[in-house]
Image: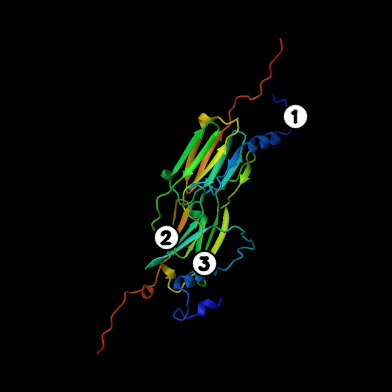
């Protein structure tokens, strides 16, 4: 039983604040572009959606290191160059996330459909707080 | 607005900027009384025999889109039918993009053949092809004999 007596949505809010998003600054290296991201928090899982229009499944790379999830996208050279107007590109980009402690890393799944990479991070069903009885 | 009537031969600007002006003079339409704030990004290319508009709108399906030609304008609109909006148990903790509803319009250049416009939705990009009219396709330099 949770010892906190605050509203469960506040607890969830506190937990998902831990889903930090680090954006690489433009001055560092070539992987300087970020990826627009939506994050949904549910009772059973977090869902991260990354907008990657113009990329293919094979252009993406998802890595887990410790509690850091990294997504890198690198596309092949485009054939038709937009010579009249260019508002988006498929240049290399990367985004990293620090996952909250309640994510069950073994159960992370991802799917890529029509330019949206959706990563599902199920929450660990183990109780994070255990009450220990005094004998 | 005046650019439409400028003779390209007299204008010092390259022809591509005229075409850019054509495309950018889209009408901001009020459809059904709603005003869509969000506009998806586009890349526009002009090739020898066609124009190509790539509109970035990931996360939709073919049937969500509506393309129509009205009064020399191409109007692209979309409304997501199968909503991935969170259920009661889910909430967005971060929202950096939203393609669930938008509209964007483009003024069609004279050279575009309105009846031959086609589109495909691949990798989250709506690729619209506008073939040029036969007469508009530039022919190579010709030499003219003097009789």
Q: Nearer the viewer, residue B46 or B109?
A: B46
Disc 1 secondary structure class: loop
Q: Are marks 3 and 1 in contact (CB under 8 Å)?
A: no
- Compare marks 2 and 1 and give the one earlier in the sequence: 1
Residue in view at x 49 percent, y 38 percent: A110
**How packed is label 2: few (under 14 Cα within 10 Å), some, or many (20 or more)?**
some
Q: Of discs 2 and 1, which sits in the foreground?
A: 2
Q: Of discs 3 and 2, which sits in the foreground?
A: 2
Check residue A61 in the rendering and tell me which mark sits there, or answer none.
none
Outermost residue toward the bottom in this view = B147
Residue located beneath label 2 in the image: A81
- Where does residue B130 sit, x and y in percent of width and height? 42, 66
Labels 3 and 1 share a subunit: no
- Residue B117's place in the image compared with B100, above or below, is below
Badge 2: chain ID: A
Disc 2 secondary structure class: loop
Q: Nearer the viewer, residue A103 or B99?
A: A103
Outermost residue toward the top in this view = A135
Residue located beneath label 3 in the image: B106
Badge 1: chain ID: A
Residue located beneath label 1 in the image: A5
In space, the residues marked 2 and 1 are separated at their CA atoms by 58 Å
In space, the residues marked 3 and 1 are separated at their CA atoms by 55 Å
Q: Nearer the viewer, residue A117 or B64?
A: A117
Outermost residue toward the right in this view = A5
**How packed is label 1: few (under 14 Cα within 10 Å), some, or many (20 or more)?**
few
């Amino acid at each position: 039983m949770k010892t906190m007596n605050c509203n469960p949505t506040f607890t969830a809010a506190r937990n998902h604040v831990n889903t930090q998003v680090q954006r690489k600054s433009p001055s560092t290296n070539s992987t300087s572009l970020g990826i627009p991201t939506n994050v949904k928090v549910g009772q059973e899982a977090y869902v991260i959606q990354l907008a990657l229009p113009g990329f293919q499944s094979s252009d993406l790379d998802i890595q887990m290191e410790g509690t850091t999830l990294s997504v890198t996208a690198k596309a092949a050279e485009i054939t038709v160059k937009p010579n009249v107007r260019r508002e988006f590109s498929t240049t290399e980009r990367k985004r990293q996330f620090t996952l909250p402690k309640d994510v069950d890393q073994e159960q992370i799944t991802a799917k890529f459909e029509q330019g949206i990479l959706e990563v599902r991070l199920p929450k660990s069903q183990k109780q994070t707080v255990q009450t220990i009885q005094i004998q | 607005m005046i650019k439409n009537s400028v003779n390209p031969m007299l204008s010092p600007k390259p022809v591509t900027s005229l075409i850019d002006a054509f495309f950018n003079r889209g009408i901001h339409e009020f459809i059904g009384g709603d005003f869509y704030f969000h506009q998806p990004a586009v890349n526009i290319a002009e090739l020898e025999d066609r124009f190509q508009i790539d509109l970035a709108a990931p996360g939709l399906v073919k049937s969500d889109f509506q393309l129509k030609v009205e009064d020399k304008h191409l109007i692209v609109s979309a409304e997501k039918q199968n909503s991935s909006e969170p259920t009661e148990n889910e909430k967005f903790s971060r929202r950096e993009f939203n393609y669930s509803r938008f509209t964007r319009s483009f003024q069609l250049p004279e050279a575009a053949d309105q009846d031959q416009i086609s589109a495909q939705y691949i990798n989250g990009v709506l690729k619209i092809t506008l073939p040029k009219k036969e007469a508009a396709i530039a022919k190579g330099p010709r030499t003219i004999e003097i009789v």
